[in-house]
Amino acid sequence: MAQEAFSRHQRLLRSVDYVRIFENSYARERNSCWVVLGKPNQTIRARLGLAVGKKNVRSAVERNRIKRVVRESFRRQGKRLSGWDIVVVARASAAVCGKAKLVASLEELWHRVSLNLRAHHGR
């Protein structure tokens, strides 16, 4: 279970990191539930940032559920996204989707983002 934890080194912690990705991302993929942005970092690890705003998801319970789904899916990506900073933005429709739909739509985006990042940056 310890290796399944979402540790501090896997998170985007500073607002500067978010700004860097929002302003100049190499990959930007979207579907009905999510917008995923990515940019290479200077480490061998993938780092995740979450943007699940009150404007799109009113209930705190729903925001927390959505964050858990994203973190779990991100952990399962392993080496696929290593060396990249990723920000996942929840769209308003994510609040009404079931877990299976959220996971399936994220898996689709992880695949598209990883292809886009590798093609753009040659990693």
Image (spheres, rainbow, N blue to C red):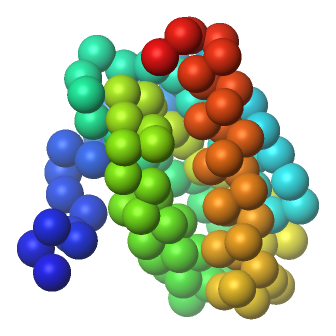
Query: For the N terminus, which image quadrant?
Result: bottom left
The number of numbered discs placed on residues in the rendered structure image is 0
Residue 113 locus on image (x, y percent): 66, 37
Q: Say if residue 104 shows up in the picture.
A: yes
Taking depth in this image into account, of 25 and 44 the one nearest to the observer is: 44
For residue 35, above or below residue 114: below
State which quadrant residue 98 falls in: bottom right
Residue 23 locus on image (x, y percent): 64, 16
For residue 17, above or below residue 111: above
State which quadrant residue 60 falls in: bottom right
121 to the left or right of 90: left
For residue 71, above or below residue 121: below
* Residue drawn at point x = 67 percent, y = 61 percent: 106
State which quadrant residue 47 falls in: top left
Residue 10 locus on image (x, y percent): 27, 47
47 to the left or right of 98: left
Taking depth in this image into account, of 81 and 37 the one nearest to the observer is: 81
Residue 100 locus on image (x, y percent): 70, 85
For residue 118, above or below residue 38: above
Taking depth in this image into account, of 63 and 69 the one nearest to the observer is: 69
* Residue drawn at point x = 82 percent, y = 46 percent: 30
Taking depth in this image into account, of 105 and 66 the one nearest to the observer is: 105
